[in-house]
Amino acid sequence: MRRSLPFLAGAALVVVLSAPAVADSGGDDGFTIKDPRITESSGLAASHLHPGVYWTHNDSDDGAYLYAVDSRTGRTVATVTMTGVGAPRDVEAISIGPDGDLYVGDIGDNLGGKWDHVWIYRLPEPKVLKDQTVRATQYVVKYADGPRNAEALMVHPKTGRVYVVDKNEDGGHLYEGPSRLSASGTNVFRPVAPVDLWATDAAFSPDGRQLAVRGYFGGIAYEWNGGKIKREGRLNVPLQGQGESVTYSPDGSKLMYGSEGADSAVQPEDAPGSAGSDSKSPSNGGGSSAGGGDGGGLGGGFKVGALAVAAACAVLFGLRRLLRRS
């Protein structure tokens, strides 16, 4: 999505002044994506078959590629090329369903809601990690209330139903797909609840009881409540250059937050209710927040001292994306 110059400059300044400490030991302690091809990681999903592996992909029209990254080393251990899906337009999200299939959301709309349909791709998670070509099923998606931009796609881990959260500076909505996606017809997603955030990604907890929604500078934890979501509080989202992805660790103890950019870090935070969290529920006042009615406060736990060159790099990166997408 196109972003304003003031937003990009502000993001760069915040990152410089409040750079979080990132453990580089890998796994649930966080890791750095080292593949030079992955410069716009926009989605993240923990593998169901391969411990320590996370699936990601580039934003925009990079191509029909998925990357399996080993969190212990940060290196790509498999590249999957999807066939049967044509040319992707703006891939923004990835999730894994209870059937073990990967669901890829080609749901971004850089034209501000002018595409009358978007796509979801579905393919089995490879049992062997190697470079390979996998045929995917392509689903046509439309929204009941008209076209829109979105970057968050989630598959419920118990029901297998697919959900989307649209991206709107004033807050968006949770959209529910049909009980089963149809490859032969149009799949209409309907708004079922407001989401008070400028959402860039979202994820279900492994038990399906929690929904975590993130934005650029904050996030919200919801109780799933059978789809009638109830806000529980704010998430402690680390400050990142352009935070666009989140997933739970396989055991549900951590939320793993990813960002766009070369050598981007995936940073962990204790999931609400986990043994390592400060309480059984998310913060109702502290932590970082963004978008909608969730303010713009910046949470604690950050180390000051990033070099000024980081600001210049962040600004140049933002300007490059702004000019490319204008």
Image (tube, rainbow, N blue to C red):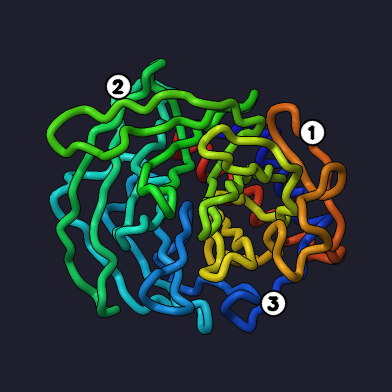
Residue type of the residue flagged with mark 3: Ala
Marks 2/3: CA–CA distance = 43 Å
Marks 3,1: beta carbons within 8 A: no
Residue under pointer 3:
23
18 relative to 194 in the view: left or right: right
Residue type of the residue flagged with mark 1: Gly
Image position of 109 with respect to 55: above or below = above
- Residue closest to the far top: 145
Quadrant housing residue 162? top left
Where's residue 95, x and y in %?
41, 54
> What SS does tag 3 mark?
loop
Marks 2/1: CA–CA distance = 32 Å
Q: Residue at x 46, y 66 (%)?
A: 46
Q: Residue at x 71, y 57 (%)?
A: 272
Q: Residue at x 64, y 67 (%)?
A: 253
Marks 3/1: CA–CA distance = 28 Å
Where's residue 218, x and y in %?
71, 45
Where's residue 18, x and y in %?
82, 57
5 relative to 263 in the view: left or right: right
Q: Residue at x 42, y 53 (%)?
A: 158
Badge number at residue 295 = 1
Marks 2,1: beta carbons within 8 A: no
Badge number at residue 116 = 2
Instruction: Answer with mark 2 or mark 1, whichever residue precedes in sequence.
Output: 2
